[in-house]
Amino acid sequence: MNRLCVALVILAAVASAQNPYRLPEKVIDEGGVRMRSVPAGNLVADGSFHQTTIGLATRPGANYVAWIGYWHPRPNTTRHDVAAVEVLAPVRFADTLNAVTPRAVVRNVGTVNETFRACFRILRGSTTVYFASTLISLPRGGQTEVSFPQFRFQTLGPHVSRCSVYAALDQDRSNDVKDAGVKVYNRPDWPENWVEVRSVPQTPTNRGVRAGGWLVYLPNRELCYVAKGNKTPDFYSFNPVTGTWQERKELPYMPEAKHPGKGGAATSDGYDYIYATKGNNTFGFWRYSVTGDTWEKMTDVPAGSTGKKVKGGTGLAYVEKGGEEFVYLLKGDGNEFLRYRVVANDWQQMPPAPVGRRLKWDKGSWLVADGGQSLYAFKAKVHELWRYDLAADTWFVNPQTPMPRYSELTNRSKKAKNGSCATWMAGAIYALKGGNTSEFWSYHPAGDSWHELDTMPSFGSTGRKRRVNDGAGIAAYGEGVIFALKGNKTLEFWRYVAGSQVGSPAPGPGRESVQADVTGKPAAMTLRTGSSIASRGASVVYSLPGSEAGTLRVFDAAGRVVRRLALVGTGGRTGLARVELPGLSAGVYVLRLESSAGVKSTKLVIE
């Protein structure tokens, strides 16, 4: 109450027309002496002057106060409040090659229709590298997605995407700004999807890549390193920019008197050293120096309680923790888990890998570090994915969501076996299923969800049908490119370039990757063909939530992309597109629609 002024007036009664408040009043005489309490009267508002009926005194021979008046601002039920709700893009990752469309969700939280300004700013440190604004009109309670002019990043590293709103009468400024982080990487101007690059050299042994083969990438050297395995000492470096191979120092045969075989695996510190197990039923553990092009034998992998040597199913992961360097080892094919201390050149026993449905960590199992506080260990054949807490050095009690066995692209259910391998890139795990399949998947810890990606082509430069099997390897090159060995006794070497959605989480439990309308109801994403049989072309009926665009790809039986079509967002309504199919052979094809909202697939028969 800003001001209270009691007025004493001798009246018989005062009528009231409104009753928004009830107050406890007292009857007082002209001297201000309370006579008695009476029921609260009716509040009557007249501008800023309020009055309430009290009633008449009952004492004989005197007149007393009939009402009390006081000044107080009238309650204002009108509320002006606008808010920035969410930054949609760019978030997480972006590159310098593709233009992005900044997008955000804003809302009118007030009680009246509002016209206000929505702004989008991208900052690198304290420097603004992008700014745009637009006027928005929304009814009370209304929400909308706002798109701003496209922008192409010119600077690398961490940036901040910021959406802000401004209304002159806004009564709550605390919800006016929303931020999201985005990391910008330099993406080469290479075509998206899988492309075979120059094959691994045949010499000196003229053998293909098989069990014990591996692939690592050293960012500091900008080179990939490949061991053939297959009981050979062959070892090479590959320059992704020039596409050239170079023979490197062979991994020594002695003292194990064996070349690398099943159980051969490797990891790197990213700068100069590669750590590798020789496998092939040995305890051999080696370190390669890029600077010196030399191999150095380190302390053998311990025999442990089982006395078993290193076999298929082994995985390695390099970790820096508390200023120390470690190499964590999942020792195939049991569940022994150890770590190698680099500075001390010794081994420590760690909590064994979870038993799960079966003890054995079979061929195709792998271990991946997320660059932060976790390791992820995948158990082949039974498809269990376990998470390890590096801070506490303990395994999580429950497994993560397993890699799906069923593939929408191949319409087959297959287990991960020999050749299954994985790498960490852009906040997600990228994995080849192996087991003589061409399947390629990404796992997103944020949503505990898997997302099927374009299959690696079965037919390579040799013209022979070969799928991923023993000796396959995979390594991230920056934040948007992957290189991979197919293994399976081939020399095939492939490059995968992710699209603009790199690192975007797929739909998963507890996280819906769909846009919602004002009511909060998610819009649907659908895909079907006008007819399941086609010849020269096919009509595609689809829907996409919001204004988000999507990409439609057509895959042949070998998993190759034979047609690609960009589709516009439909706001949840039905859209229609046509895919031209001349020149394609008769057979069964898969149509796959992909956007940030998820993936939908359907079959098409071409006659």
Image (spheres, rainbow, N blue to C red):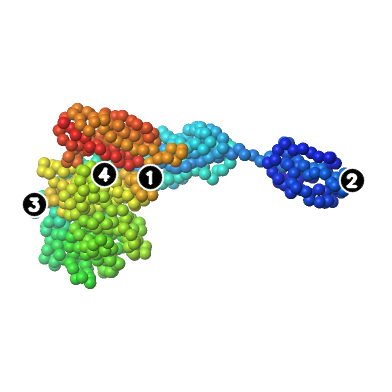
Asked if the residues shown at circle 4 and circle 2 are in contact, with their CB atoms under 8 angstroms apart, the answer is no
Q: Which residue is mark 1?
A: 512
The one of 242 and 303 positioned closer to us in this rendering = 303
Q: What is the distance, in whole Å, between disc 1 and disc 4 at their CAs?
A: 19 Å
Which residue is rendered at x = 79% and y = 38% of the image? Answer: 14
Image coordinates of residue 379 in percent, x first then y, are 24, 58
Circle number at residue 62:
2
Nearest to N terminus: mark 2 or mark 1: 2
Image coordinates of residue 520 in percent, x first then y, are 44, 41
Q: Which residue is mark 4?
A: 453
Residue kind at label 4, given as amino acid type? Leu
Q: What is the distance, in whole Å, between disc 3 and disc 4 at their CAs?
A: 33 Å
- Which of the two discs, 1 and 3, sits closer to the camera? 1
Q: What is the distance, in whole Å, between disc 4 and disc 2 at their CAs?
A: 94 Å
Q: Which residue is mark 3?
A: 206
Residue 80 image-quadrant placement? top right
Which residue is rendered at x = 15% and y = 56% of the image? Answer: 211
Q: What is the distance, in whole Å, between disc 2 and disc 1 at their CAs?
A: 76 Å
Nearest to N terminus: mark 2 or mark 3: 2
Which residue is rendered at x = 22% and y = 50% of the image? Answer: 433
Residue kind at label 2, given as amino acid type? Ala
Nearest to N terminus: mark 1 or mark 3: 3
Asked if the residues shown at circle 2 and circle 1 are in contact, with their CB atoms under 8 angstroms apart, the answer is no
Image coordinates of residue 458 in percent, x first then y, are 16, 43
